[in-house]
Image (tube, rainbow, N blue to C red):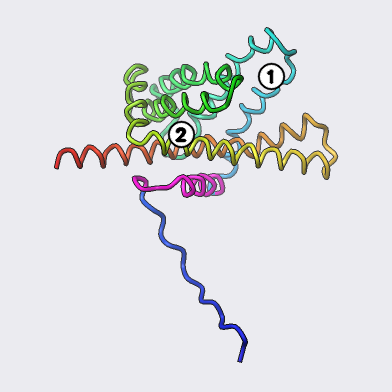
């Protein structure tokens, strides 16, 4: 007889619905979305690499600040494409342009906020970032999208802020880890290793941000239904 009884293998519990989804499950679902659409999701990192290259090649000071608007233009491409990829919304239509304009408006101040501390940038994105999927999915104009994004965020602001903070932490840690692995073991230069790490890891934050829209829309709908009862 074996000394220790064989541990029974139990199936994992079913995932929680979006209205009850935890931050940990959000990250897990973002990783699953990445894996199920790997090549399309990987392309989301290309604008990030270009944006990083613009910043890296610019000298510090005023010239670096001058390229920050260009980084917002590039990062907005990744976010809009991630929303379309996760939510199954066609890109080639009129409201894609509206969603892109909203994304640029939302992302423009983020680099300046992050310069001082990352938390103000995350707080800003948590409050206004959901306006982008609202514009693309709900076919809203710029002003209506921003108002809708704030309403979605207020349904459970802590969940949005916590989700973005966790996604950012996972991406930063994973990116630095991959950077050092590529630099030490693949004999890449510092810039090449950093670019490859950003290309591979950065899509995760865009995919997770798109899933946050699903969570908040479900939470808002549930809250409204309870008020009507």
Name the front one of labels 1 and 2.
2
Specify the quadrant that holds the C terminus: top left
Q: Is residue 118 above or below residue 17?
A: above
Q: Mark 1 — residue? A: 55
Q: Residue furthest top?
A: 62
Q: CA distance from mark 1 to mark 2?
A: 26 Å
Secondary element type, mark 2: helix
158 over 61 or under it: above or below:
below
Q: Which quadrant would residue 159 be assigned to in this image?
A: top left
Look at 37% across and 17% down and name the residue there: 142
- Where residue 184 sits: x, y (%)? 83, 42
Residue 194 included in the magenta stretch of the image: no
On the image, the x and y values in percent for residue 139 come to 33, 26
Which quarter shows the N terminus? bottom right
Q: Secondary structure at mark 1?
A: helix
Left or right: 172, with 22 as reference point: right
- Looking at the image, residue 74 sits to the left or right of residue 189; the answer is left
Q: The magenta stretch spans which residues?
A: 18-35
Residue drawn 33% across the image and 22% down it: 147
Task: Mark 2: give few (<14), some (14-19) or many (20+) Cα within 10 Å.
Answer: many
Task: Specify whether 56 is left or right of 69.
Answer: right
Residue most toward the bottom?
1
Location of residue 6 in the rendering, given as x and y in whole percent from the top left corner: 56, 81
Residue 174 horizontal/vertical position (percent): 65, 42
Q: Residue at x 66, y 34 (%)?
A: 198
Packing grade of label 1 (10 A; few <14, some 14-19, many >=20) is some
**Residue located at (47% from left, 22% from top):** 103
Q: Is residue 59 above or below residue 15?
A: above
For marks 1 and 2, the one nearer the N-term is 1
The residue pinned by badge 2 equals 161
């Amino acid at each position: 007889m074996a000394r220790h009884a064989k541990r029974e293998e139990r199936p994992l519990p079913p995932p929680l619905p979006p209205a009850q989804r935890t931050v940990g499950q959000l990250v897990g679902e973002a990783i699953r979305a990445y894996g199920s659409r790997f090549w399309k999701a990987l392309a989301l990192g290309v604008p990030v690499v270009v944006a990083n290259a613009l910043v890296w090649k610019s000298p510090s000071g005023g010239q670096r600040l001058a390229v920050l608007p260009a980084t917002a233009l590039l990062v907005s491409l990744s976010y809009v494409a991630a929303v379309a990829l996760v939510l199954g919304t066609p890109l080639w239509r009129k409201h894609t342009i509206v969603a892109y304009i909203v994304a640029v408006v939302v992302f423009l101040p983020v680099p300046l906020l992050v310069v001082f501390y990352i938390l103000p940038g995350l707080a800003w994105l948590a409050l206004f970032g959901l306006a982008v999927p609202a514009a693309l999915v709900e076919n809203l104009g710029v002003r209506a999208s921003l108002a809708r994004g704030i309403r979605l965020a207020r349904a459970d602001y802590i969940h949005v802020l916590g989700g973005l903070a966790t996604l950012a932490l996972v991406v930063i840690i994973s990116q630095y880890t991959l950077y050092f692995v590529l630099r030490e073991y693949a004999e890449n230069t510092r810039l090449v290793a950093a670019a490859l790490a950003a290309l591979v890891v950065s899509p995760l934050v865009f995919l997770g941000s798109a899933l946050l829209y699903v969570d908040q829309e479900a939470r808002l709908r549930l809250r409204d239904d309870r008020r009507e009862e």
